[in-house]
Amino acid sequence: MPQVTDIGTTWNLPNYAGELFTADPTQTPFLSMIGGLTGGRQTDNFEFPTAVLYDFPEAEQPEISESASATAPAASHIARQQEKNVVQIHQEVIDLTYAKQSNSGRMSGLNTAGQNPNPSDEKAWQIQQKLIKIARDVEFSFIRGNYQLATKSTEANKTRGMLELCTSDTGTSIAAADAALNKTMLDQLFREMADNGAYFGKMVLFCGAYQKQMITNLYADQFKANMQTTQNVGGMNITEIETDFFKMGVVWDRFMPNDSILIADMAHIAPVFQAVPGKGVLFQEDLAKTGASDKVQIYGQIGLAHGPAFLHGAITGLKTTATA
């Protein structure tokens, strides 16, 4: 359906009888599992740290003689490096005329005696849909967002998403080059994550519909792995698979690219909100009136604290159709 821009009136937002449906995804599994739009951390700086990393030198067997030990070696120290992300602005506005809100009993389309318009309260319904839109945009950004740091007021901050993190120079990822997902590929990713230092705390694999079926077939049909839908994380029932290194939930997420899978350690991920003083972190407020309408905005500044890249992994560029 086309979107109505500018002001909402009796004529461009007609009322209808009947139950409301949308085919667009409204579930946001990744966001739900890390606290949704009401949980998480807060920041008073649009840049915030995601991790402070340090490395040990390669392990080795010391070779220090008694004579050599009489003289202390040169001093050395472990250096640290900070990694960061940013919050991005989410802003939505509705503007409904008084006349539109007054005509709740005027209905278009097919009508039968005794039917009521749905929704009954246009303003409340539009605000609720805007909150769902923000949640959808946050889910998309947290998975597929591309990092951008603003350096002036005319530039937008954009939060880094999980797939960009995993495919960065310090991340763990496999480029499938249009190959079909297979057990060897998954085992390679798990092994590389282990070698790169992943903690394997609370692992969840996110994927689209096609890759979800591929994973089910790989583990249930070919390899007879023990798959149980016993985990409940963030209100989502998720399938659990046990690998050589960790137990992992598998979640179908309609905001994942069809050609990719993401394995995220949810124990080290959280949404970050930047509050506006006196207003909160995601708030609704009336805008100045210029006439006979209610103009309302919803505003929030939200980013992703994803932890260090080595905790997570991804496979990209997977085949998305079955072989004929």
Image: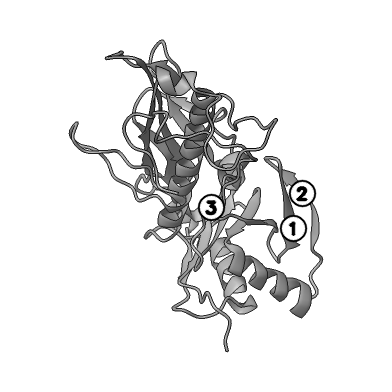
Residue occupying image coordinates x 59% and y 50%? 265
State the colouring used for the structure image.
one colour
Residue drawn at point x = 62 percent, y = 41 percent: 33
Q: Tag 1's secondary structure?
A: strand
Residue 223 visible in the current orientation: no
Q: CA distance from mark 2 to mark 1?
A: 7 Å
Residue 311 image label: 3
Q: Tell me where residue 291 appears, x and y as whole percent.
A: 29, 14
Q: Is residue 37 above or below residue 175?
A: above
Image quadrant containing the C terminus = bottom right
Within 10 Å of disc 2 (Cα), the crowding (few <14, some 14-19, many 20+) is some
Q: Which mark is residue 240?
A: 1
Q: Earlier in the sequence, mark 3 or mark 1?
A: 1
**Element on which disc 3 rests:** helix
How crowded pointer 1 is (Cα within 10 Å; few <14, some 14-19, many 20+) is rated as many
Question: Residue drawn at (74%, 57%), measured in percent from left and top?
Answer: 239
Which three-letter amino acid code belongs to the residue tagged 1?
A: Glu
Q: Which mark is residue 231?
A: 2
Q: Give the number of the disc on residue 162.
A: none
Residue 44 in percent (x, y) is at 38, 22
Q: How far apart, in angstroms, are the residues tagged by discs 2 and 3? A: 21 Å
Q: Earlier in the sequence, mark 2 or mark 3?
A: 2
Q: Nearer the viewer, residue 234 or 208?
A: 208
Residue 4 at least partly seen: yes
Q: Measured along the vertical axis of the image, is residue 71 above or below residue 317?
A: above
Name the front one of labels 2 and 3: 2
Residue at the spot x=64%, y=53% of the render? 203
